[in-house]
Amino acid sequence: SSHFSPSCRLRLVAPSLRCTCAGKAARIPMAAVDGHLRTLLLGWGFGLDLIGLVLLPLVHADTSILVRDAICPWMVGTPHLSSAHRQFMLCNLAFALCRGLGGVFFDEAGAYYIAMLSFLAEAIAVGSEWRYHGIDQAWLATLALAGVFTLMFTRSINGMPKSKPS
């Protein structure tokens, strides 16, 4: 059985996002969506990925293990700074650059699409941990990553935010 109600819909009605759930409708202006997406890209890219998963292990091992295990349950038990952990850190550095720079250069289509695709790539990678390796806790991360990708894709259908003339 599905956990999602078939009565909820999210539609793009330029220049806003229209959400209808249980017969009630709300319009969200695209400017508000853009502001939240920019904040999400900056926070997720530079905050979570860069500071939490890449830099923290270099300065405080015990705290970084707690953070990593809480955010990424598929990494539980991986020795600190082992080969697998260093590879994980490099992947998150790449995601940090894609997402953080996507937030900085939000009005540029290329940066936006690279950031958007980084969520799809990580959703596929984390989903494989869930499906092929039996890490049941990975489903929530997969859902969150796929949800951000879907929101960004839906936003891109309406066209990119207009760049300010220089």
Image (cartoon, rainbow, N blue to C red):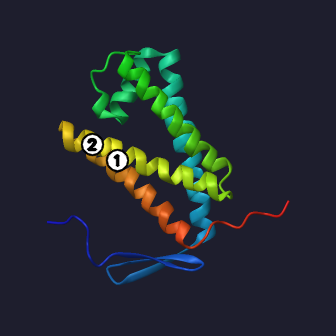
| Residue at (25, 67) in percent of width and height | 4
Is residue 27 visible in the rendered image? The answer is yes
Is residue 137 visible in the rendered image? The answer is no
| Residue at (60, 78) in percent of width and height | 15
Q: Nearer the viewer, residue 96 or 33?
A: 96
Q: Nearer the viewer, residue 135 or 157?
A: 157
- Mark 1: few, some, or many residues within 10 Å (few <14, many ≥20)? some
In the rendered view of the protein, which quadrant contains the N terminus?
bottom left
- Mark 2: few, some, or many residues within 10 Å (few <14, many ≥20)? some
Q: Residue 132: name its quadrant.
A: top left
Q: Say what amino acid the circle numbered 2 marks.
A: Ser
What kind of element bears circle 2? helix
Say above or below: 127 vs 55: below
Q: Position of residue 134 (x, y in %)?
A: 17, 38
| Residue at (42, 51) in percent of width and height | 120
Q: Position of residue 57 (x, y in %)?
A: 47, 20
Q: Position of residue 45 (x, y in %)?
A: 54, 41
In the rendered view of the protein, which quadrant contains the C terminus?
bottom right
| Residue at (29, 79) in percent of width and height | 7
Q: Nearer the viewer, residue 87 or 25?
A: 87
Q: Position of residue 146 (x, y in %)?
A: 38, 55
State the residue position of label 1.
Answer: 124
Q: Say what amino acid the circle numbered 1 marks.
A: Ile
State the residue position of label 2.
Answer: 128
CA–CA distance between discs 2 and 1? 6 Å
- Which disc is residue 6 wearing? none
What kind of element bears circle 1? helix
**In the image, 98: left or right of 4?**
right
Q: Is the C-beta separation of discs 2 and 1 under 8 Å?
A: yes
Q: Residue 80: name its quadrant.
A: top left
